[in-house]
Amino acid sequence: EAQVTQNPRYLITVTGKKLTVTCSQNMNHEYMSWYRQDPGLGLRQIYYSMNVEVTDKGDVPEGYKVSRKEKRNFPLILESPSPNQTSLYFCATRGAGGLDTQYFGPGTRLTVL
Amino acid sequence: DQQVKQNSPSLSVQEGRISILNCDYTNSMFDYFLWYKKYPAEGPTFLISISSIKDKNEDGRFTVFLNKSAKHLSLHIVPSQPGDSAVYFCAASEMDFGNEKLTFGTGTRLTIIP
């Protein structure tokens, strides 16, 4: 079964405490990305990766880091979280079939106090 | 500046009737459009898409219409079923330095009334 998993699903943390949200996929997709969803703004892309060791900024990369050391994993790192990073985060993967083959993870709801 | 707009935050439709969800865009470089469906506590799932060279695409109960001159697309669901109750996002794609970049609308919450 095609799966994109994210952990944790829910997280409450405090300003400045480094955290990592993991994303893993079992579809051997080369393209992976992170989005955040905020009320009134839709989903916005944070970072994307076209393959292992290839990452690039999306529309809202400030305050985030990513790494792509292996094909299946694409962690999102918040080195010093701030309250404006409180959001719902989605990892997504995309297959060779293009945009119609984009799968999203179940989401991680992050609250930064 | 919201390049993809869904002006109706919510919509209620009687079961069995037609649901019409609308989406407007401003960027003429968008060349591919998609609709996603999202249930609570789940990620969005792909529903249907349309290329800018077409004006209609149909898949079962779902039809997407594209009016390029008006920069408008719509999703028709006929007949509507209770399981269609969800948030629907439209999204538009453009090529941005080798990345097929998606821009999402803000979503419309569809409620099907039994």
Image (cartoon, coloured by chain):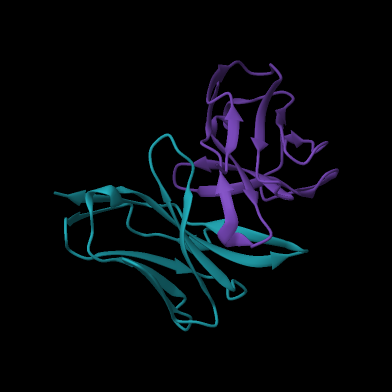
Chain colours: A purple, B cyan
Q: Residue at x 63, y 25 (%)?
A: A82
- Would residue A103 appear left or right of A80 to someone viewing this image? left
Q: Residue B73: name its quadrant.
A: bottom left
* Closer to us: A9 or B12: A9
Q: How many numbered callouts?
A: 0
Residue that protrudes farthest toward the front in the picture: A1
- Would residue B47 appear left or right of B32 to someone viewing this image? left
**Residue A113 visible to an observer of this rendering:** no
* Closer to us: A4 or B8: A4
Q: Residue at x 71, y 32 (%)?
A: A75
Q: Is residue B22 above or below residue A73?
A: below
Q: Is residue B83 above or below residue B98?
A: above
**Residue B16 visible to an observer of this rendering:** yes
- Would residue B20 appear left or right of B44 to someone viewing this image? left
Residue A33 % position (x, y) = 67, 46
Residue A27 % position (x, y) = 65, 45
Task: Look at the image and tell me in which quarter the N terminus of chain B lies.
Answer: bottom right
Q: Residue at x 55, y 20 (%)?
A: A11
Residue B13 % position (x, y) = 19, 56
Residue that protrudes farthest toward the right in the picture: A53
Residue B77 % position (x, y) = 29, 64
Q: Residue A110: name its quadrant.
A: top right
